[in-house]
Amino acid sequence: LPMAFRDVNARRHIGLQQLSALALAGRTLLGPMKSCKFIVDESTNQSTLICSAVRLIESLDLTSAAGQLLNETIQAQNKEFKTGMSTLLFLIGAWSNAILECLQQNVPISAIVSLMSEGLNSCCERVQCLQISIQDVNKELCSSSVRPSAFKSKTCQTGHDSLLNPQSFLYFQKDISVPEEVIPINSHSRQEDGCNFNKCLVSPLAGLGSIASLVKPAGDKSTSVISGSGVIASSYNKQKLTHSRYFSTLGKSHFSHQQDNFQGYLSGQSADPRECYGLGHLAMTLSHGNQASMKLLQSIVAYQQERAECSGSSQFNIAEVVTCCLLGLPESYSCVSPGLVTLVSPEQATVIKYIENKPLRILLVDGDLTEQYRHLGFNRPCNVRTILEHPSLQEGRAGDLWLSRMLDILINFEVNLVLVKGNVCENLMERCIANSILVIGSVTRDVLCAFGEVTSAQPVTYLTQLNSSCVGNGAQVDLWKACDGRAMDLGELVPARVKVRGIPLLTAVLTTTVASKMQLIEDQFWTLVYRLHHALNDEKVFLGGGAVELLCLSHIRMLAEQPLQPANKNAVKEFHNPWLAASATEYKSVVLQALASGWKQYLSVVMCNTAKAASELEACTSIDHHLKKAAGCGSPSAYILKEFRRGDLLGGGSGLFADHGEGLKVYDNVTAKTEAWRRALDLVLLVLQTDAEIITGPKRNQLLNSHMSSEFTFL
Amino acid sequence: MSRLEAKKPPLFISEPLAKDTVSQSLSLLSGILKSCYGPAGRLKQLHNGMGGYVCTTSQSSAILSRLSVSHPVLSVLTASVQNHISRFSDCGLFTAILCCSLIENFKSLNVASCTVIKISKHLLSLCMDYLKSEVCGCRVSVDFSSLETLLCLVRSVLTSKPACMLNKPEVDHLTMLILKAFMFTVPCHVETNAVLGKCVIVPVKGRRVVDSTVLPGLLIETPEIQLAKPLAVKRTCSNMIKIALFCVSMSGDLFNPEEGTITVHHGISLEMSELNQLLNVGKQLINDEVGLVVCQKVIHPSLKQYLKENHVVAVDRAGLSLMEPLSRMTGSKPIASIHSLSPCCYGSLKDVRIESFASKHFVHLIPPDTVVCSLILCNRNETAWDELKRACETAEHVLQLTMKEPLALLGGGCTETHLASYIRHKSCSLSSSSFKDMDCSRTQYQLVADGFCRSLESVACSLNHDGGEILTDMVYGHCWFVPSGFPSVSNWSDLVSKCGCGINGNTENLNWRLLQGQFGSPIIQGCPKDPSVKVSDFLTLDCFAAKCSGLQVALETANLILDLSYVIEDQN
C-alpha cells in the first residue's frame, strides 16, 4: 500500500514556511552589489563559491515538495532568461511571508489567490508606462534634451574623466586641425572623426584581427581607459581605436553634457544614434555595474554590428558567442577573440605550431570519432559471429585496420583540421598528430554550424561518408596569446584559436587566477549577454534603479484605496465565478498590502545591499517619503520618471545602481522582470492552495516506521 | 532445489463495509476528493518523498492514477471512476464524490441493501428521464452556429483546474485556442462517415501561456535543421509535395532475428549491406520524385546525406504518437519495410516550413485540407504545464462529446441542487402502485430518496472551501453561495448576487433556504422551474454526456459496493 498522506496545516502553512526559509538564503544576492557565499558540504568539507540564485539553489538540499517546486521555478527562469533569478527567489520568500500573515488574519485562501493575481496583473499593466523603446535609449545619450539641469553641477567632476578620452584621441589623430581650446566644436568634430575612424578600423576585424581589450578591475577609473592591443594588428594606433568605440561613447556623453552648458553653440546637431552608440550604450545600461563583462560584451557588440552592417544579418546573435575559461591568468586578460578559442594538449599544440597561419582544409564531425561509435538509434546486433577461415598474418588487428582506414580518408581528402562534437579515439588522435592533422573534440553544435557556414564544410557523422563537398576551406589555427603576447603556461593545456575569414563566431576568453571564481565570472558574463539579447527581443527596457517597483507600490496604494465597484460594474461582462470572487472586497486592502510588501522589501534590501541605506528601517522611510511625494504630485509615474531622469531615485545618484559612472542610466529587462514576478507569485499561490501531500512509492514504508509517522495518514 | 510451501488458506472477510478501517479509508478518500473540487479546490502534491518530480494537481485523473489503494472496496470505486474518466475525461471528481456520498448516506439508513438498490435504481431512472426530457430545467441546448455556449463549456473546464495557474486574460486566450483547434479537427467535406480529426499538443515549457498558439497541420521537432537555409523541397507537377512515411527504423541496424546466431565470414560487413539497402531505397525515393521523407525512428546519417544532396528533405524521430495523424493528414500509408516500396504508399502535402518557438525548431507540415492541427501549449513551469495539458485534453474531449449530443448542463452546483429538488418533489407525488412494484414502503422510499438528494447536494457543497453558506432557492432549485463572516440570520437576498452557474441574478425574491440546514431540506411545492432566461455569456456549463454518465456510474458503483457481502483475499 504505497501511499501516505499529510495534511498541511492551514494556519501555519508548512509549504509556505519552507519557501520562506529557503528564500532567506538569497537575500544578499539581490541587486547590483551581491555578496558571495561559500557553501560548505559538511560531509566532504568541500565548498563552493556562489553568487547567484541558481547556483545557490543547486547547492541546497531540496527534497521537500515545496523545495522541488522552488528549484523547478528557478531553473525555468534561468533556462528562459538567465537573469532575474535573484529577484524571483527573493519575492518568493517575501510573498510567502506576507501570505502567512494574511492566513494568520483568517483571510480565506480564495480571496488571497484572486486578489493577488489580479493585483499583479494590474501592476504589470501599470508599469508599462516606464518602458522605453530601444531606439529611445540609443537616442538618449546622443540628444542633449535628456540631461536635466540638475546634472550641471556635476559636470566639472565628470569632466575630469572625460578629458582622458579626447586627449587620447588627439594623441592619435595628429592631423586634426581644430584648436583644442574651443571645446564644443572640438568635441563635435571629434565625434565625427571618431565614428569614421571606428568604421575603417573595425573592418579589418572582420578578417583576422583580434579584439582584445585590457580590462582593469572595476573602480580603477584612472587606468580603465587604456585599451588593449590586438594580437595580429600591427599598428598600435589601430589597437587603440578598436576599443575606443565604447570610450568614445563615454566621452561623447560628456560632451553632450557640455553642449548643454554651451547651449547655442551646437543646437541642431544631430547624429544617427546607431552610428554613434550602437548597442554598446545599451549594454552599459544593462550591466548594473558589472564592468568586466560589460566591456567584453561591448567588444562583441561592436564586432557583430560591424558584420551586420556588411551582411545584413541580425545585430546581435547570441548563438555566435562562446566562452573559453582560462584559469591562471589575471582577470585583466579577459578579452574577446574572433573564431574559436579552446584548450588543447601540448601534443596538439606542436601540430598547431607546424600548421600555424596556413590555410587549412577543415572537416566537421557530428558525433564521436571512435571505432565503436554509432549514431543515436542504432542498435548493435548481439548475435552475429564472425569467422575467419584463412587467417593471414599480414592483416593486423581490427582496430589498426580502422585506424589506418580513417587516417587514409583524412589524408586522401587533405584534411588538416577536424572539429569533433563528441570524443576522439586516443589512438587516432596520436596518429593524426603524427601526420600533422589537428583534431579537436568536444565542440558544440553551434560552433560546428558557424564553421560550416563560412567554410562550406558539411558536418558528417562517419568519416566514411566523406566526399569532397563535405570538406571546407580557409580555416586557420594558431596558439592563442594574451594581449601582451604573454605565453600561456596553464599546466597541461594550451589555448589555441581556430578562425576563418568572416566567421561570425566570437569567443569570450574569461581569465582568472582564482579557481573558485571561474564559474562565477562565466555566469555573470552570460547573464549580461542574455540581458542584452532579451532587451533587443523585447525591443524595450524598463527604467531601472527601483523605478518600476516604486510605481507598483504607489499603484497598489491607489488600488487599495479605490472602492472595488468599478470592477463590479464590468462584472456583467466578466466570467462569473462566485467561488473565487465572493469574499474579495472585504479582504482587499490586507491582501494588496501583502502584495506590496514584497516589492517594498525588495527595494529596501537592495538599498541595504548597495549601502544606500544603513538599515531596512531607513530604507523604508526613504521609500515611504518617495511614495508620499509621488501621491502628492498627482501623477506618480510622472514623478518617478522625473526623479529617474534627475538620477535622484532612492538614495541619490542615478538610482540604486549609480556607482559606476555618473549620469549613467540603469535599465532592466521588461519580460524577464515581469515574468520573474509572475513566476514568484504563481509558485507561492500554487503552494498556498495545496492542502495535502500525497507520498507514493517506497518512501511510504520508511515514513510508516519513522518518528514522523504520526504526521501522516496511511490509506 | 526449491522447497514447497503449503498454500495459505484465503482470507474471508464478511460485511466489509461494516469494518472501521474501510469506512475510515473511504471517508479519507472522500475528503481528499471533495477538497479538490471546483475552481477554489485545494491542490495536492503528489511525489515520492525523495526529491523527485512533484505533481501539483486537483484533477481526479492525475490523483487516481497515482494513488494506489489497498482495500478492494476502494479499488472498486477508483477503478470505476477511472473507467468513467477514460471514456469522458470530465466529471471524474463529481462521480467519485457522489459515489462516496451515496455509500455513506445509504449505509447509515436502516434499510436492507437490496431495497436501497431497487429504490435508488428507480431514482436514477427518474433523473435520467428528466435530464433527457425537453422540460428539464437544468440543461441548455448548445448552438454550434454561435460561439458563446462553446466558449462557456471550455472556460468552465479551464477555470475548474486552479493548478493551471491561469489569470483571466490567459483563460480567455486558451479558451479561444482550444475552440479554434477543435474547429480545425472538424472535416470540411462530410461524407457518410464523418470522423473528427486530431489536435496534437506540442509542449513548450517555460513560456508564457499567452505565447500558446494553434497551427494547422503537424509539427515535428528537429534539432538539426539550420534555420538560415530556406527549405528547398522538390514538388510534383501539381505543385504538391510527395511524402513518404516510414514506420520502420532506417538507422541501418540489422533486422532483429528472434533467436539464434548469424555467422558471417570475416571481411563481410552486415552493416554495409544494410546501408546499401537503405541507399537503394533512397534511390527509389528520388526516382519517385518524393520531396519529403519522414521516419518514425532514426534515419542513417549516410542516407540523410544522400537524400539531402538530392534535395529531398529527411525528417527522422517523428515518434509513434505522430504516425497516425501524419498518415491521416497526408493520405500516406506508413511503410513498414525497407525492402519493398510501393508508390501507392506516398501521400501529399501542400507545404513544408520551418517554425521555431522558444529554443525549439520544428518542421511544419501543412496539409491540403486540415483535420489535423497542433496546439503549441506553453506554461511557465513543468507542474503547471502538465496540469494545463490535462485540462486542454479534457476540454477538447468535452467539445467532441457535445458535438455528438448538443446539450450542456448548468454547472456551479446548480444541476445537483436542481436535480435534488426535482427528486424531492417527484418522490412525494409517486403513486402507491410504484411502491408495490419496488417491494418497499413509502417511508423506505422517502428515506432512500432523501439520502440520494443529500448526496447530490453534498457534491454542490463540496464546491465551497472557505467557509460561508450554501443556499438553494425555492423557485429554480439552483445553488447559491454566501461568503463567510455574515450572521446566518440576515436577509439572504442582501448577500447573494448570482447563482452558481450564473444564469439567475438576485432580481426577484427567490425564497432562499440553507442547503443541508439543521431543519432538513425544504421541499418545493411545484416542480423546480426552468429559468426562462436566454443563455447569456459567461455561464458555468458542464458536459452533458460526462455528467449523465458520472451520475450513472456513481450510483451503480455505490450499489455494487453496498451489495458486497464478502471479500475473499488470496494470501499467497
Image (cartoon, coloured by chain):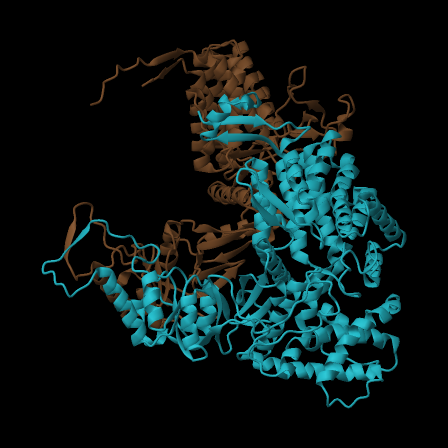
Chain colours: A cyan, B brown
Nearest to the observer: residue B424 or residue B103 = B103
Q: How many marks?
A: 0
Residue under the image location 25 percent in, 59 percent down: B338
Q: Can the viewer see residue A54?
A: no
Q: Is residue A68 above or below residue A435?
A: above
| Residue at position x 64%, y 18% in the image | B521
Work out whether residue A175 can be spotted. yes
The residue shown at (56%, 24%) is: B31
The image quadrant that residue B450 belongs to is: top right
Instruction: Return the x and y of residue A170 as percentages of the image width and height.
Output: 75, 83
In the figure, A627 relative to A363: above or below? Answer: above
Pick the residue in front: B347 or A391. Answer: A391
| Horizontal and vertical percent position of residue A466 | 32, 71
Relative side of A468 to A23, left or right: left
Q: Position of residue A688 (x, y in %)?
A: 64, 35
A411 over A527 or under it: above or below: below
Report the front residue among B481 and A518: A518
Classify the position of the N terminus of chain B by image quarter.
Answer: top left
On the image, the x and y values in percent for residue B492 come to 75, 26
Corner quadrant of residue A452: bottom left
Q: Quadrant of the C terminus of chain B?
A: top left
Q: Toward the viewer: B115 or A415? A: A415
Q: Is residue A289 above or below residue A231?
A: above
